[in-house]
Amino acid sequence: MSRFSWIDRFRNKIRIKGKNNNINISKNSKIVGCKIIIKGSNNTLSIGKNSILRGVNIEIIGDRCKLFIGNNCMIGDGCYLSVKEETKLIIEDMCGFSRNIKVMTSDGHPIYKDKKRINYAKDIIIEKKVWIADNVTILKGITVGSGSVIGINSTVTKDIDKNSIAVGNPASIVKNKIYWES
């Protein structure tokens, strides 16, 4: 079941292939200039109340994948959210994503060693009130703790504690016990 209003379909490029996909976009949310691709069955895309997505690429490929964007989130131009291989990407309430941010639950292609796969996809959780600056990449299996800030051009390869600032490639925590105001 999909629920995109006619205005959503007019303002965005939306392609859905498969069966039993569940799309829930809150009436108070706004998606403009986004590209949404869902390929597979039994997937879920949910965008909470008062969230704004501008120029975002959303890619859900596989079966039983889940992408949840909470209430009062802002996701900026050029962001890429990719969920594959029965994983989930959870972005909790009040998160702010600047521009050109990549969040991917999968490496994109399987890699093998001795005929065994070595790079399975993993869930990503971005907890409440996280601010992510321009050009950040968040890789599979990561949890970013609530109240944190990820600095510009960072690559997040390990979990970030709540109320921390993390920067660099790979990102590391440079300050903790912080808070920020929107």
Image: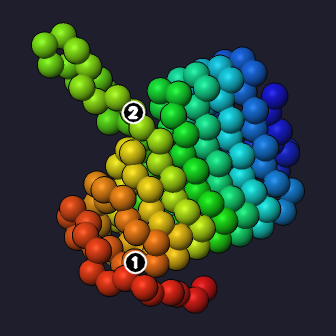
Q: How is the image coloured?
A: rainbow
**Residue 29 picture location, percent across and down:** 77, 61
Give the vertical position of 142 relative to 134 (above or below): above
Task: Tell me: residue 84, above or below residue 138.
Answer: above
Residue farthest along the left direction in this orientation: 114
For the residues bearing labels 1 and 2, Cβ distance under 8 angstroms: no
- Considering depth in this image, is 105 or 108 the residue closer to the camera? 105
Which residue: 72% across, 17% down? Answer: 19
Q: Is residue 127 visible?
A: yes
The residue indicated by pointer 2 is 121
Q: Which residue is mark 1?
A: 164
Q: Is residue 157 left or right of residue 141?
A: left
Residue 99, quarter of picture: bottom left
**Residue at horizontal 52 percent and vertical 87 percent from the top:** 180
Quadrant in which the N terminus is drawn: top right
Q: Secondary structure at mark 1?
A: strand
Cα–Cα span, label 1 and label 2: 26 Å
Q: Amino acid at mark 1?
A: Ser
Q: Residue furthest top?
A: 115
Instruction: From the viewer's side, name the closer residue of 37 and 124.
Output: 124
Q: In this rendering, does residue 152 appear at all?
A: no
Sequence-first disc among 1 and 2: 2
Asked if residue 37 lies left or right of residue 148, the reply is right
User: Mark 1 or 2, which is nearer the eye?
Assistant: 1
